[in-house]
Image (cartoon, grey):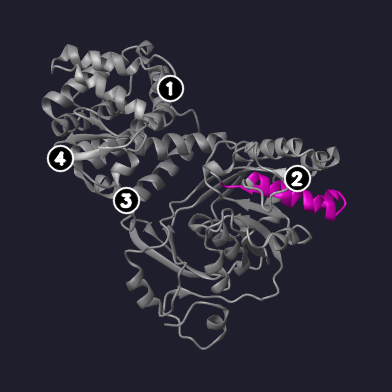
């Protein structure tokens, strides 16, 4: 089978119907340096640059830097930066698939073997944007990092080396500052990256003029990214390649939905005209509402609905959404309790919620409930608890399903026994392995050991769990009515069973 590369695009190869193929001029300048060559950036940012190039609105390419010693740069270069992207999901309720060869990447650089080539990019006046996705741990301060290392160990260290070389090469020219757009999933990612860059500049005794140049002539943007990228489809790859008719070691898959919120000056939207090609990119001077919307609706719906669905005996998000009872349970949580608890424009919230429900129903993505349960207690604290507290403040009562979801989460740990760093627990369907922080697992095991099956004992379990400030950062027994309601739901789950309890709740039967 022939390999995907530039020669294939230029030749007489007959590509399959339905595959979008478009060749661009080879002399398009490199305008972006990107730290990270993984599945997410290739299915998100590089796809967006490709879309703009198709419409002749960017006319530039991306040079990709491998942020760690092992990576995909060698394979990327073997394919001349080309790869096949398959986006799949529901569109207006119908299964939809879009296949396209992406050609926005010019080449890849491994700084561990091509350090001089990496620094040479800093000398290119056309390169004005930095993109990164080096995992959440990538934006972190390493006090032992050094400019003498070639390359520095950390991503911020590599970025400082790049910027310092650029500063020196262009003699501190203000016009050669960079627009730096991190995509790592941490709050205020741009602010955090800038802080670490300046800290390392201090540690490495770099000139004050350089630090001033960083502060005044480089723009660090905070962002929020949203797209499920399922990556290389190893379970389907044989059939996919047979249909494509060529070899591609970098096939990437993801969902149709995408959202990129960028907090920054509106004038940058002219230099990066994503919206002009219909991309769901929002430029704003305050990304807080969008982050609240995503965390509370998308992440919150996952975290609050999954414990009950898992105990019910379901395995995936898709199965949960298609289930008559649990699908309705999820929708009631989102539309009746989460949205009313958020003090933002209702239309903005509802439109996003509609997209979330459609994404949860995506038949092409198998998102296992047990994986969502990973570290559930810490997720619940940030994603669901604020909705419970705010709902009560606004309406003077606790939200029934969200409060029940807290009881369902506690019930997941019932009958669990810690083994090593995980817990072997049981649901009606059988045993499963629960993963969480070890102190959390040990706490729940000890708490449930005292349960004797009575209503009073269920209330005591609730009281003990809600008092754990290490989990919740406060004693939640102070929230009016929460201990009693969680305790009552725990008793119902353990005495009646999860199915009967959820069925009654969804139909409006309380207590």
Between marks 1 and 4, how big is the CA–CA gap?
A: 36 Å
Percent across and percent down for residue 300 are 39, 35
Does the magenta stretch mainly form a helix, a strand or a loop? helix
* Residue denoted by label 4: 430
Question: 10 Å neighbourhood of mark 1: few (<14), some, or many (≥20)?
Answer: some
* Residue pictured at 47% horizontal, 39% vertical: 294
**In front of the other: 414 or 19:** 414
Which of pointers 2 and 4 indicates the residue nearer the eye?
A: 4
Location of mark 2 (residue): 218
Q: Which residue is under mark 1?
A: 390
Q: In the structure shown, which secondary structural element does the residue marked by tag 3 occupy? A: loop
Q: Is residue 109 magenta?
A: no
**x then y, percent, for residue 19:** 45, 74
N-terminal of the pair, mark 1 or mark 2, is: 2
* The residue stretch that appears in magenta: 156-183
Precedes in sequence: disc 3 or disc 4: 3
- Can residue 511 be seen by looking at this rendering? no
Point 42% across, 80% down: residue: 16
Q: Which residue is label 3 attached to? A: 361
């Amino acid at each position: 089978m022939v390999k995907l590369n530039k020669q294939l695009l230029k030749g007489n190869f007959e590509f399959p119907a339905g595959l979008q193929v478009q060749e661009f001029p080879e002399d398009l300048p490199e305008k972006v340096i990107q730290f990270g060559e993984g599945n997410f950036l290739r299915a998100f940012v590089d796809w967006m640059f490709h879309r703009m190039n198709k419409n002749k609105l960017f006319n530039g390419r991306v040079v990709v830097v491998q942020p760690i010693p092992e990576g995909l740069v060698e394979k990327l270069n073997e394919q001349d930066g080309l790869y096949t992207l398959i986006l799949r999901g529901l569109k207006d309720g119908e299964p939809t698939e879009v296949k396209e060869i992406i050609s926005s990447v010019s080449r890849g650089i491994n700084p561990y073997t091509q350090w001089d080539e990496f620094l040479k990019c800093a000398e290119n006046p056309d390169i004005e944007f930095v993109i990164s996705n080096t995992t959440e741990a990538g934006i972190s301060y390493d006090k032992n990092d050094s400019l003498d290392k070639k390359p520095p160990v950390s991503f911020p260290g590599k970025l400082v080396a790049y910027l310092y070389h650029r500063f020196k090469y262009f003699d501190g020219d203000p016009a050669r500052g960079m627009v730096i757009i991190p995509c790592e999933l941490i709050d205020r990612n741009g602010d955090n990256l800038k802080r670490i860059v300046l800290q390392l500049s201090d540690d490495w005794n770099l000139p004050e003029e350089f630090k001033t140049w960083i502060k005044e002539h480089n723009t660090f943007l905070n962002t929020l990214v949203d797209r499920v990228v399922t990556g290389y489809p190893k379970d389907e790859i044989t059939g996919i390649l047979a249909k494509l008719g060529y070899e591609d070691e970098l096939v990437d898959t993801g969902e149709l939905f995408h959202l990129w919120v960028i907090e920054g000056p509106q004038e940058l939207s002219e230099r990066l005209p994503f919206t002009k090609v219909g991309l769901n990119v929002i430029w704003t001077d305050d990304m807080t509402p969008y982050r609240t919307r995503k965390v509370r609706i998308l992440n919150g719906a996952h975290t609050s609905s999954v414990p009950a669905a898992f105990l019910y005996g379901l395995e995936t998000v898709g199965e949960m959404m298609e289930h008559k009872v649990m699908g309705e349970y999820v929708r009631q949580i989102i539309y009746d309790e989460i949205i009313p608890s958020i003090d933002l424009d209702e239309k903005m919230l509802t439109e996003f919620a509609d997209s979330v429900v459609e994404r949860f129903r995506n038949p092409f993505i198998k998102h296992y409930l047990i994986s969502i349960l990973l570290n559930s207690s810490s997720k619940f604290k940030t994603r669901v608890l604020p909705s419970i507290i705010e709902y009560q403040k606004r309406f003077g009562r606790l939200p029934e399903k969200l409060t029940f979801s807290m009881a369902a989460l506690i019930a997941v740990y019932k009958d669990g026994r810690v083994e090593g760093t995980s817990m072997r627990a049981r649901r009606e369907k059988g045993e499963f392995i629960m993963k969480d922080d070890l102190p959390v697992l040990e706490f729940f095991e000890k708490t449930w050991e005292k349960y004797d099956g009575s209503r009073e004992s269920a209330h005591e379990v609730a009281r003990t769990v809600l008092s754990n400030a290490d989990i919740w950062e406060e004693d939640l027994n102070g929230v009016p009515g929460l201990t009693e309601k969680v305790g009552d739901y725990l008793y119902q789950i353990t005495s009646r069973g999860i199915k009967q309890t959820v069925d009654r709740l969804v139909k409006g039967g309380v207590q």
